[in-house]
Amino acid sequence: SRNGDGRYAFLNDLSSVDEMFSRKLAGALRPAAADLKVQIEFNPERVELYRQVGFEKHQLKREYFRDNSIDAAEIAAAEAGNALYVVKVNPRGKGDLGVFRIRYKEPETGAYKEREWPLAYRREVVAFADSSSAMRLAVHAASFAEWLSESPYGAGFESEEAEADLRVLRNEFPAESPVKRLSKMIGQARSISR
């Protein structure tokens, strides 16, 4: 982000405060990468339309990617980040979907590094029901957030279907997982919206 929003966590009860605080503090004190920026550049010959889901406040303009004066994120070795995009692909187009780039400053040396990987186009993709547990969880969370914000993109969200799939996903994650909390939030929102 451009304004250094720091780390955050969602806590459902006081019993998780100590563990969450120590994990976040350890990551803040021992970053694996500083000034981390991520850029997805879609190939217009393959991708007709795209939209990042969420993070509207934190999207940088294209020209800021290599501008070291613009504040960016930090990430610890044990942390991960996610971004979800909705894309409309042209199957008759040419080339890959695009390029994924990261730029970061090594904490030890202060040197900036940049890496990139192609986003391969695959004609055949896995159906949502057969996709990874992590992907299904991300899509349910993003769809629910779009629905809660009354975004037009959340119009197709079906809370009963999401809850049913989340019950299956609980087996893939730890007992007190975000899956269980997300399912509970969806159920509460559904009961209020009736």
Image: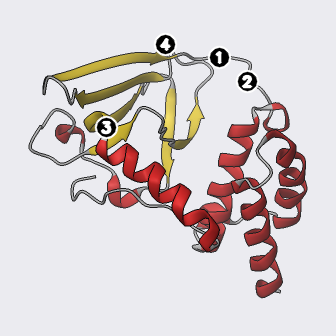
Tell me: 9 left or right of 108: right
Q: Say which residue appears at 50% left-offset and 16% top-offset.
A: 96
At label 3, which amino acid type do we have? Pro
Question: Closer to the camera: disc 2 or disc 4?
Answer: 2
Mark 1: few, some, or many residues within 10 Å (few <14, many ≥20)? few
Which label number is shown at residue 95?
Answer: 4
**Residue 8 spot, x, y in % from top left:** 43, 61
Question: As displayed, is residue 168 above or below residue 146?
Answer: above
Mark 3 to mark 4: distance in Å? 36 Å
Q: Earlier in the sequence, mark 1 or mark 3?
A: 3
Mark 4: few, some, or many residues within 10 Å (few <14, many ≥20)? some
Which quadrant would residue 162 be assigned to in this image?
Answer: bottom right
* Residue 10 in sight in this render: no
Q: Earlier in the sequence, mark 2 or mark 4?
A: 4
Q: Earlier in the sequence, mark 4 or mark 1?
A: 4
Q: Say which residue appears at 60% left-offset and 73% top-offset.
A: 14
Which label number is shown at residue 31?
Answer: 3
**Residue 184 spot, x, y in % from top left:** 78, 69
Residue linked to disc 2: 125
Tell me: 114 left or right of 84: left
Mark 2: few, some, or many residues within 10 Å (few <14, many ≥20)? few
Mark 2 to mark 4: distance in Å? 16 Å
At label 1, which amino acid type do we have? Arg
Mark 4 to mark 1: distance in Å? 10 Å
Question: As displayed, is residue 9 above or below residue 85?
Answer: below
Front in this rendered view, residue 7 or 156: 7
Disc 2, disc 1: CB below 8 Å?
A: yes
Disc 3, disc 4: CB below 8 Å?
A: no
At label 4, which amino acid type do we have? Gly
The kind of secondary structure element at disc 2 is loop
Which label number is shown at residue 122?
Answer: 1
